[in-house]
Image: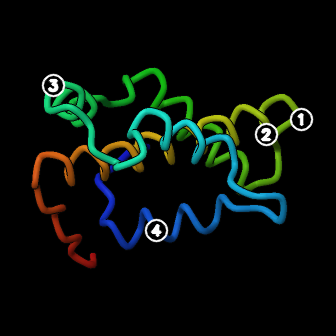
Amino acid sequence: MASIQSDEECTAMRTALMDQNGPAEVMIIARVLGGADRKLGSRMARHILGCRFGKADRDRMHDLAVRNQDDSLDTREKAELAAYAKASTLISILKSQARQSLGIKSRKRVAS
């Protein structure tokens, strides 16, 4: 599920998405959409901040995640779960860029 990430969390995700050959496609797309200076237009930034996964996608991600913990996903479902993870990461990175472009500080997460 997509959620608001702190800049530190986004940096950790960026690092995790790097492989020995360079940045993963998620980072390339984020750079292209964010531009070289990482500044998004205010209209685009506001639009990105409003993006959310729909209920059907959230339910599907939850189902895949639960069944993945039981190691009961087939190859196609594992690929689908990975695709959701990449999409969620891309959305998180873009939301971080949007907040920076609009001068909005990210919300601090409270440990539960």
> Residue visible at 31% across and 45% down?
95
Q: Quadrant of residue 111?
A: bottom left
Q: Return the mark for residue 43.
A: 3
Looking at the picture, how far across and down is residue 100, in whole percent? Answer: 21, 54
Sequence-wise first label, 3 or 4: 4
Q: Quadrant of the C terminus?
A: bottom left
Which residue type does callout 1 highlight?
Thr
Which residue type does callout 2 highlight?
Lys
> Dot 4: few (<14), some (14–19), or many (≥20) neighbours within 10 Å?
some
Q: Assign a secondary structure to mark 2.
A: helix
Report the Cα–Cα distance between label 2 and label 3: 35 Å
Looking at the picture, how far across and down is residue 104, in whole percent? Answer: 10, 55
Which residue type does callout 3 highlight?
Arg
Q: Is 16 situated above or below 59?
A: below
Looking at the picture, how far across and down is residue 92, in whole percent? Answer: 40, 48
Q: Assign a secondary structure to mark 3.
A: helix
Are discs 1 and 2 less than 8 Å apart at CB? yes
Looking at the picture, how far across and down is residue 97, in whole percent? Answer: 31, 49
Q: Which residue is mark 2?
A: 78
> Dot 2: few (<14), some (14–19), or many (≥20) neighbours within 10 Å?
some
Report the Cα–Cα distance between label 4 and label 1: 29 Å
Q: Which residue is mark 1?
A: 75
Sequence-wise first label, 2 or 4: 4
Tell whether 76 sits left or right of 69: right
Q: Quadrant of the N terminus?
A: top left
Sequence-wise first label, 4 or 1: 4
> Residue visible at 29% across and 29% down?
51
Tell whether 41 sits left or right of 3: left
Q: Which residue is mark 4?
A: 11
Q: Is 73 situated above or below 54?
A: below
Report the Cα–Cα distance between label 3 and label 4: 24 Å
Q: Is 89 situated above or below 18?
A: above
